[in-house]
Every structure is written in C-alpha cells, then in structure tokens.
Amino acid sequence: MKVVSNIAELRALLGKWVGNSSSIGFVPTMGALHKGHLSLISRSIKENDKTCVSIFVNPKQFSPDEDFDIYPRDLDQDILTLDGAKVDLLYVPRLEEMYKPGSLTVITVPVIGDILEGVYRKNLFSGVAMVVAKLLIQVGPHRLYLGEKDYQQLCVIRQMVDDLDISTDILACATIREKDGLAISSRNVRLSDQQREVAPLLHQTLLEAAEAFDNTGDELVTAENSTRKLVERGFDKVDYFSICDGLTLGAIGPKTENIRILAAAWLGNNRLIDNIALSTILTRTAGGNNN
Ligand code: PAF
C-alpha cells in the first residue's frame, strides 16, 4: 500500500492509474478504523480496480465544545489494518495541506443540513461538505463509499455532489452492527460497561418505533412515545427522534415511500446516533393515516 500525505504525490499516483483506465473507489475516514469502515473498503475493492482511503480528523466539522482533541486516533494500527485489507493507496493529508492559510471559501448545504444533527452540531455539515468536496476534487474517484450509519451526512453529501456537478457516484452501504444491534462507531470505545449495556436499546427502540408507526401511521405520537421509552431505558437525554421522509429528512407527505427513522441520544458524555429504514411501503391517506 502506498501512503501519501500531499496533493502532488496523490495526483501523480492516481493520474498514472486513471491513465491506465483503472476505476478508482474512495473511502474517506477520520481513522480509528473499525468493521464499519472495513465493509466500505471491501465493497470498494470488489467494485473498483484501485481503492484509495483517506484518514483526516477534520477540525472544521467539530464545534469548539465537541470532542476534536480526544477523537480516537491510531494511525499506526490503521496503516496495518488497511495494508492487510489490500487497500492500494492511503492519503493522510496534513492540516496545512487541507486548509491553506488564507483560504476563504466555505460550503454550506442549508435546509437538509440545518435540521436534526444540524440543530445540535452547528459546524458539522459545513465542515463535512467542505472536506468531502476538497477530497473529491483532490482524489477524483469514480465511486465514493459512505455508510448509512451517518444517514444525514450521506444526504448532505449527495446534495452537495449534485449541486456542484461532481461526477462521482455515491454508494450507500448498510450500517454494520454489533451482535446486540449497537451500530459500530469509533466513539463506542468511550462507553462505560454500564453504558455499553444500555446502548443497543437505541436500535431496539428504533425497531419498535417502526412497528408502532406501521400500525398507527402516526409519526408524531410514535416519536414522542419512543423518546419517553429511551429515557425510561436509561438514556440521559434525547436530542431528537424523527420519523421522516428518507430523501429530504423533512415531514412525511401522503406519497412518501422512503421513510427513515433517525435518533440521537446521550449516555453520560457520549452521544449516540442511529437510524433505520422503514421497509414497509405504506398506503397512507393525505391525513397521514394508513387505515
Ligand atoms: O464520517 C466521517 O468519518 C467523516 O465525517 C468524513 C466523511 C470522513 C468527513 O470528515
């Protein structure tokens, strides 16, 4: 595996591969790699001639009160993991390479980026949009692999790629879960034993909400009941529990077919997010009822 840390080296290598008509798959990460990342990487390896992975803990997507300083980092272990996974190229840009002093451009994706996570994490999506746009311009991949675990991030990046006419296909990959249903995340290492026991109940509550919504067709009451249930089950605070249109993440309309349930809840200082698709396509009336 080649490891590069500047744009010139990156472009030289990728230019050679593209010149030989190789297709390039790209998996952007912030490191602390886990089974979720590896599932994106193995799909990219299957579907492309060459796979490039980036590791960059992007300061722009953290607000000052968030966990940038203590975000898990283990570059040596990550390099071993990626080498073992047969990745072709690892790009580890330096901070000053990514954000040159004096740069002024900002990218924001309003509306879809302002709701849900955007309400609680003010810098998240402008930071994600900026770094992913830059990485896509630098790497120029044919395919970009993103996990559904960060479902709103996926929607924001789709919108940004479409708005900016970036000619990369986006492939959404299913969330990888522990046996008990907990969505795998780099931040799970911070859960105490007791929090780790409660954590899978987030997924469990999403599944129960899907069933309740399927029966009643009432997204607001289902969300309210689910929020209460999460607190009863040991979560300290629920930022949101939303049953919404899976494309816009806004309110469900009578014709919405793609429905998503997303939630964010706290266990002590740890904030967990998760989401599921509502697989059943409901035939609902304009009032939002499926009776
Ligand atoms: O999901 C992540 O790890 C990050 O938000 C991403 C997409 C690599 C951008 O920094």
Image (cartoon, rainbow, N blue to C red):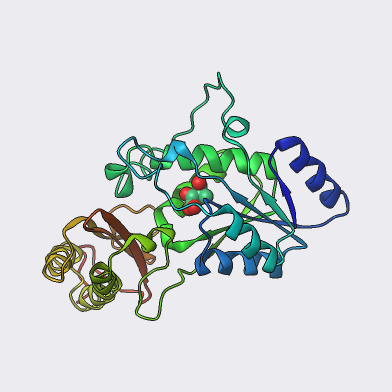
Comparing 69 with 105, the one in front is 69
Q: Where residue 224 sits: x, y (%)?
A: 13, 63
Left or right of 59: which side holds 256? left
Quarter that holds the C terminus: bottom left
> What is the residue that sits farthest to the front in this orientation?
76
Comparing 32 with 206, the one in front is 32
Left or right of 274: which side holds 21? right
Q: Is residue 1 above or below residue 166?
A: below
Q: Where residue 208 sits: x, y (%)?
A: 23, 77
Comparing 188 with 244, the one in front is 188
Q: Is residue 7 above or below residue 202?
A: above
Residue that appears at 37% across and 45% down: 112
Q: Is residue 66 visible?
A: yes
Residue 195 picture quarter: bottom left
Q: Is residue 170 visible?
A: no
Residue that appears at 39% across and 47% down: 70
Residue 279 picture quarter: bottom left
Left or right of 27: which side holds 248? left
Left or right of 72: which side holds 141? right
Q: Where residue 275 sits: x, y (%)?
A: 35, 65
Q: How many marks?
A: 0
Q: Where residue 223 sits: x, y (%)?
A: 18, 64
Q: Is residue 29 above or below residue 128?
A: below
> What is the residue that sits farthest to the right in this orientation?
20
Quarter that holds the N terminus: bottom right
> What is the residue that sits farthest to the bottom in this orientation?
179
Residue that appears at 88% across and 54% down: 20
Residue that appears at 35% across and 41% down: 111
